[in-house]
Image (spheres, grey):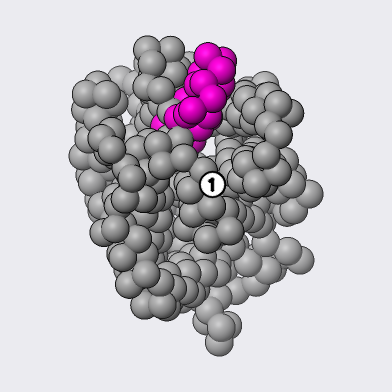
Amino acid sequence: MYKFAAATVTFLLQCVFVVNGKTIFGVFRSDLAREKNGQYITKFFYQAGNGLMVYRLENVPAAVQKDARLLMFHNTQGFDNLSCLDRLSHAQLSITLSAGQHNQTIPQQSFPQAWHILYVDRYTCQEQEILGPSEDLKFQIILLNPDSAGNPLDHFSAEEAGLHSFYFLLILAYFIASCIYMQPLWQALYKGGPMHTVLKVLSIALLLQGMSVLFNYIHMARYARDGVGTPLMGSLAEFCDMVAQVQMLYMLLSLCMGWTLSRSRKSQSKPLQWDSSPTSTSLAVGAVLTQGVLLVWEQFEDTEHHSFHAQRSIPGLLLMLLRVVLAVLLASVLYHITSSERSALKRDFYLHFAKGCFLWFLCHPVLVLISGIFNEHQQEKVIAIGVILCQSISVIVLYQLFLSRSLYWEVSSLSSVTLPLSMSRGPRGRF
């Protein structure tokens, strides 16, 4: 766990110094452009019309001497199979860097499309080594979509449009729900009881989700003004989400494994007791560490500030596979429990618990598959919005299960020491 914490802190600190906005500061380098057959700058989804690309450049004479250009492409698929000259010839736009500032209007298009920007110069396709020192060029690029009035002032890419409003509405919903349910929830936590730890874990997970939404909103509110945002807030949002994911995974696995192990010993007096055995603990901790490593690895692979990605990277695909495997494992465990359970009340409890588990684990893989039917600029939004809503609903379902009088209190009344994750191991006659 210490290694995982160290890795996440390292990732967080690195992200503070990385700018991933649509106002981009950097350096054009001839050696990098030559090595990569063009220095890749960024990708931006332009809306149907009135898009604008603005560049500002230092040391214009050096850029003119090197015949420096910016190339804009609709599609970069298959570039690895093309020669350097063939790759450059596929550019839809070629912009010569011959001024300190230039505004480039994007041609009209019938639907939102991605534009990729590459830097090239006279040395890019040269086979011989660059002779003598090659001066780097400092630049700033601003990418703008039309706003509601049709003016090119919107920093948001088409794939990010609407997320700012979504986060605002979600924060409003969290605030209203907290005003309504905070007092009864606090009373339930203060009262204690056999499910005290479960309720604490759910509350902390929901708090972390709310903090992630708030940090994302702060980042995007600043992003709307300058195209850079606050990378620290985006990193904190991802960090809060990772902690919530790990915490929920450990709780759900611990519950299911504890129930299974207690039944394997056929304990009649404590049929639902979670026994923290080496087997259950090892399985839960192993799954948590695996998911934690994959989450951190995924963030290093994709540095854009999204808590949920379209999973085009290897760690992202492995993370989805892990969630599917865990869902199948939990389904097997819960099926084994419910098939041998005679009490209809307990079966109903387990079935509702299964719904919350499956919604938490399977929403991301299912939404990634569903997103394939949408246009490219809509896929990230479908995944991000869908996963946040589904996992919030999952937490609410589990809350209702463990707090409702018809399920939680009646099941707990069957035996005051039967439910898992019990805080007290002494006499519980008072419950």
Residues in magenta, as a range: 250-273
53 or 403, which lies in front? 403
Question: Could you say which is closer to the camera, residue 151 or residue 1?
Answer: 1
In the image, residue 259 lies in the stretch drawn in magenta: yes
Kindly identify the residue that appears in the image at 73 percent across and 28 percent down. Answer: 339
Q: How many marks?
A: 1
In which quadrant of the rendered image does the N terminus lie?
top left
Q: Is residue 344 left or right of residue 61?
A: right
Of 150 and 2, the residue lying toward us: 2
Residue at x 21%, y 39% (from the top left corner) = 13
Residue at 70%, 48% (x, y): give it: 371
* Residue 285 placement (x, y as % from top left): 38, 21
- Quick one: 67 or 268, which is closer to the camera? 268
> Where residue 246 sits in the image (x, y, percent)?
40, 35
Q: Which residue is rendered at x = 62% and y = 41% of the image?
A: 346
Tell me if mark 1 has few (under 14), some (14-19) or many (20+) residues whose alpha carbon lies within 10 angstroms of its own. some
Relative to 280, is 364 on the left or the right? right
Percent x, y for residue 315? Answer: 50, 26
161 lies above or below 398: below
Is residue 414 something one can see in this rendering?
yes
Main SS of the magenta part reads helix
Q: Can I make out residue 56 in this image?
A: no
Say which element carries label 1: helix
Amino acid on which the number 1 mark rests in the picture = Val
Q: Is residue 284 left or right of residue 427?
A: right
Task: Find out whether residue 111 is within the magenta segment.
Answer: no
Would you name the residue on which mark 1 appears? 411
**Occupied quadrant, residue 332:** top right
